[in-house]
Image (cartoon, rainbow, N blue to C red):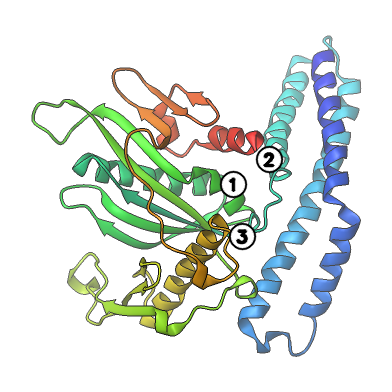
């Protein structure tokens, strides 16, 4: 028990440091100001701004609540550690150890959030997947990654919505776009951007040979109206078409899906998940705005007119992570050298280790 107590004391020191960095008194003043704004009679006149302010208040309130609870929990665990010794009742001692493990898990997630100080880290995430080199294998790998991120969102308590999906010719997907909502979702997932590589025995050829395929993952922050850039409507080509679906009674009788092309950069975005053309257009504009803001930041451009489209090569030598299913089993991130020997668990959404390693590296 002495070792457990020493470990808890180390965590307590880190929590105190975290509390100083978060500055709870200023957070409480910020929440007070936001709640005052929410309480004004005309608050809901601008529904979009009201939704943003409400979400901001929710995030700040959750931050305060989480840090205060964590500080209280560590104090209580240390007090319990004083009362439990190696001679204590085994059942009581095990219950205490289980509580410590549960606390360490929740603390690890909170500790990671202290690395998230980027401009958009607190925003929701727009995650896109594009099948690259590898034909049907790459399209199948794209669907595997889509499931991986949906499972990660579910495991993490985030909500996820598939905004657009283009099915593969034989299997899998050509591309998809997912909106993942939750506290710091962009901050957590931004390190997933890049080319992902799969090595396995292909189920799509008669010889069952070993094949390598590549998929590009893009992660962008959902940009709120207060962070938006001005897009010239004349720079947009907007096409509408029927949403793809299950057919039968569910088939779309009208053209509700929307595809928007930003002509100066040739960026194309689409949304077909919403019920109306207007809703799909709004979501597509959010994705386009996020892509343009990201491109501006990459190119350090001050004006939208200064940016140009850039393509990422989806092939050997550009990958950030490899998923090897044959001749051995391993998933390795080439930026941090972090690796896991159970690719099935990783592809089932257990990617926290990779996310933590990338955040700590930065």
* Residue 116 x %, y %: 68, 48
**Sooner in the amino-acid sequence: mark 3 or mark 1:** 3
Find out whether the residues at labels 2 and 1 contact each other: C-beta distance under 8 Å: yes
Looking at this view, is 93 or 19 the one in front? 19
Residues 195 and 157: in front is: 195
Mark 2 touches mark 3? (CB < 8 Å): no
Q: Is the residue marked by circle 3 packed among few (<14), some (14-19), or many (20+) residues within 10 Å?
A: many
Residue 1, horizontal then vertical, whole percent? 81, 15
Q: Is residue 316 left or right of residue 346?
A: left
What element does badge 1 sit on? Answer: helix
Q: Which residue is mark 1?
A: 188
Give the vertical position of 220 relative to 268 (above or below).
Answer: above
Can residue 221 be seen? no
What residue is shown with label 2?
112
Residue at figure coordinates x 63%, y 53% from the top left: 184
Identify the image quadrant of residue 258: bottom left
Q: Are marks 3 and 1 in contact (CB under 8 Å)?
A: no
Mark 3 = which residue?
A: 123
The residue most toward the front is 306
């Amino acid at each position: 028990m002495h070792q457990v107590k020493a470990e808890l004391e180390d965590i307590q020191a880190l929590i105190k440091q975290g509390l100083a960095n978060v500055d709870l008194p200023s957070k409480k003043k910020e929440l007070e100001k936001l709640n005052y704004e929410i309480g004004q009679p005309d608050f809901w006149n601008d529904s979009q701004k009201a939704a943003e302010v409400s979400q901001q208040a929710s995030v700040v309130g959750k931050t305060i609540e989480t840090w205060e609870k964590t500080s209280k929990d560590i104090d209580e665990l240390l007090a319990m550690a004083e009362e439990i010794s190696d001679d204590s009742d085994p059942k009581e001692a095990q219950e205490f150890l289980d509580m410590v493990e549960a606390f360490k898990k929740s603390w690890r997630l909170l500790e990671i959030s202290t690395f998230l100080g980027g401009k958009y880290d607190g925003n929701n995430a727009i995650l896109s997947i594009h099948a690259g080199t590898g034909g049907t294998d790459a399209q199948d790998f794209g669907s595997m990654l889509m499931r991986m991120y949906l499972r990660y969102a579910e495991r993490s308590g985030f909500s996820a919505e598939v905004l657009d999906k283009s099915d593969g010719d034989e299997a899998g997907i050509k591309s998809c776009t997912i909106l993942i909502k939750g506290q710091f979702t962009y901050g957590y997932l931004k390190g997933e951007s890049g080319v992902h590589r799969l090595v396995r025995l292909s189920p799509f050829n008669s010889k069952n040979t070993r094949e390598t395929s590549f998929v590009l993952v893009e992660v962008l922050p959902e940009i709120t109206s207060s962070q938006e850039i001005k897009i010239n409507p004349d720079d947009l080509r907007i096409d509408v078409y029927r949403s793809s679906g299950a057919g039968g009674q569910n088939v779309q009788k009208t053209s509700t899906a929307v595809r928007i092309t930003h002509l100066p950069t040739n960026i194309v975005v689409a949304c077909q998940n919403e019920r109306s053309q207007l809703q799909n257009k709004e979501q597509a504009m959010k994705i386009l705005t996020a892509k343009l803001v990201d491109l501006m930041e990459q190119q350090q451009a001050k004006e939208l007119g200064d940016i140009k489209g850039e393509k990422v090569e989806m092939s050997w030598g550009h990958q950030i992570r490899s998923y090897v299913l044959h001749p051995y089993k391993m998933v390795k991130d080439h930026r941090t050298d972090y690796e896991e020997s159970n690719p099935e668990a990783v592809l089932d959404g257990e990617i926290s280790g990779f996310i933590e390693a990338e955040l700590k590296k930065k």
